[in-house]
Image (cartoon, rainbow, N blue to C red):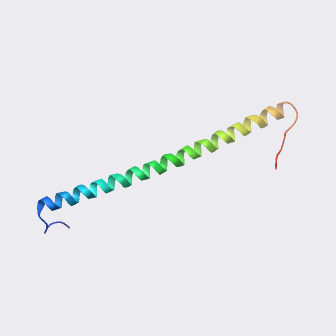
Amino acid sequence: MTSGLDPVIAQVLQARQASTNQQVATAVAAKQLDATKQTGDAINQMLETIATAQKQIAQGYLDVKV
């Protein structure tokens, strides 16, 4: 790709490409972290709901909200 270019220019282009690749990788990792946090939050909320339901059942009733 850069075989006909001056070696210095080729190095600059490679460095810019490496920088762009790193920025993309960082953005993708951030999105994955956000998705993982949202999933964890949803699981925690579900566990809290289940715990509340179990307590209610143990007391002989179940409050079902629609």
Q: Position of residue 36 (x, y in %)?
A: 53, 45
Q: Nearer the viewer, residue 22 or 50?
A: 22
Quadrant of residue 57 within the rendered picture: top right
Establish if 57 lies above or below 30: above
Count every numbered label the image shows and give the total.
0
Image quarter hosting the N terminus = bottom left
Q: Position of residue 58 (x, y in %)?
A: 83, 31
Quadrant of residue 21 within the rendered picture: bottom left
- Residue 19 as seen in the image, left or right of residue 44: left
Establish if 48 lies above or below 23: above
Please tell me which residue is depicted at 22% across the width and 60% down the height of the picture.
Answer: 13
Q: Position of residue 10 (x, y in %)?
A: 17, 61
Please tell me which residue is depicted at 26% across the width and 57% down the height of the picture.
Answer: 16
- Residue 12 as seen in the image, left or right of residue 57: left
Please tell me which residue is depicted at 52% across the width and 47% down the height of the picture.
Answer: 34
- Residue 50 as seen in the image, left or right of residue 20: right
- Residue 34 as seen in the image, left or right of residue 66: left
Q: Position of residue 59 (x, y in %)?
A: 86, 30
In the picture as drawn, the residue positioned furthest to the left comes out as: 6
Please tell me which residue is depicted at 38% across the width and 52% down the height of the picture.
Answer: 25
